[in-house]
Amino acid sequence: MICKLGFEVRGSHDINSIVTPNGEVCWKTLTDCVICAESAQGLDYWGSVRLLGPVCEAIHSHLSHLPRGQLEMQFTQWLQWTSSPELFAEIFDALESLQSPAISLSLMKLTSCLERSLGDVFLLIGKECPFLLRDLLASEELAQVFGQSVMNVLEVFVGSPRGLNLRNVLWHGFAAPHEVPAKYCSAMVLLTAGLGQLLKRYLRHAERALPRRPPLALTRVGDLSVFPGVTHEVLSVLEELTKKSTFILRIMLPYWELALIKFKSTRLCRKCGLSARRSKC
């Protein structure tokens, strides 16, 4: 579904029917692509992904051709509602790089950030945030804030194993770097900005402020420092081992290479995230 569905539909979408020149997301174009099953029981995920394919392609082409300054001017303000707005500068870098592992990592982090942020929105109305993302997206609380048709769009992208299921496919290590098209990363950036626009209207009308849950703090970080320091010589050996190891699938090797790069730049948490999900394959 991720690799092929939606690519067979030819034709282009007018980007102005998806996002206005000042960055306002036109949700109707997106929600019209999400269709119900013939039995009227739930959504037609295959049909919806097929219709959303060209729309995502148009979004990706648009974001790719925007100068960096204009991209940030149009969308940064609408990403401030998320738990990690600083993350999007890295995502823009990854999209500009055209490097599949970096784009997959960016999409993985984006879906995690979105899940946390939607949990904060849920707590505007609800008491206890659902543990699973699919239950969170199916909640009446989020439908009250964003509208059911918008939540249906998110369900197709990240909320159901019958849809694209981008969050789980990436976090559980099922996808090789080239198997997740960059257009889905661009589309998720735009959707996240669009949610920020809808949320601002809701908060203004309700005269409320978005509650922020404190980030998880590791209070005993010292207990984790039980391994000796890794020298450049050891990293060189690790690089050779990843290339020769029968444990690592060849198609997954770019992820391991990126993990070592992150390790060298001391981004340990991202390295652990990358290597952990590769080890599950």
Image: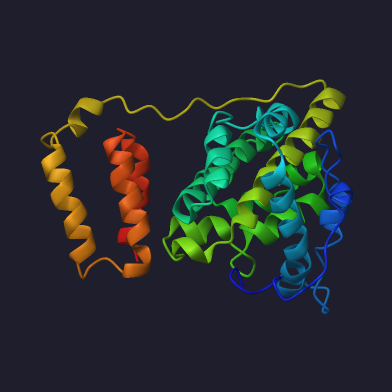
Percent x, y for residue 151? 75, 51
Q: Position of residue 184 (x, y in %)?
A: 63, 56
Name the image quarter holding residue 198.
Answer: top right
Q: Position of residue 174 (x, y in %)?
A: 44, 66
Quadrant of the rendered structure where residue 157 is?
Answer: bottom right
* Coordinates of residue 15 in the picture (x, y in percent): 84, 50
Nearest the eye: 92 or 228: 92
Q: Is residue 223 left or right of residue 31?
A: left
At x 79%, y 34%, the residue is: 197
| Residue 269 shows in the view | yes
At x 21%, y 53%, the residue is 239
Query: In the picture shown, does residue 82 fall above or below 178?
Result: above
Asked which quadrant contains residue 38, the reply is bottom right
Total count of labels: 0
Horizontal side of residue 83 vs 246, given as left or right: right
Identified at 67% across, 32% down, the residue is 79
The answer to whether any part of residue 43 appears in the image is: no
Viewport quadrant of the N terminus:
bottom right
Specify the quadrant that holds the C terminus: bottom left
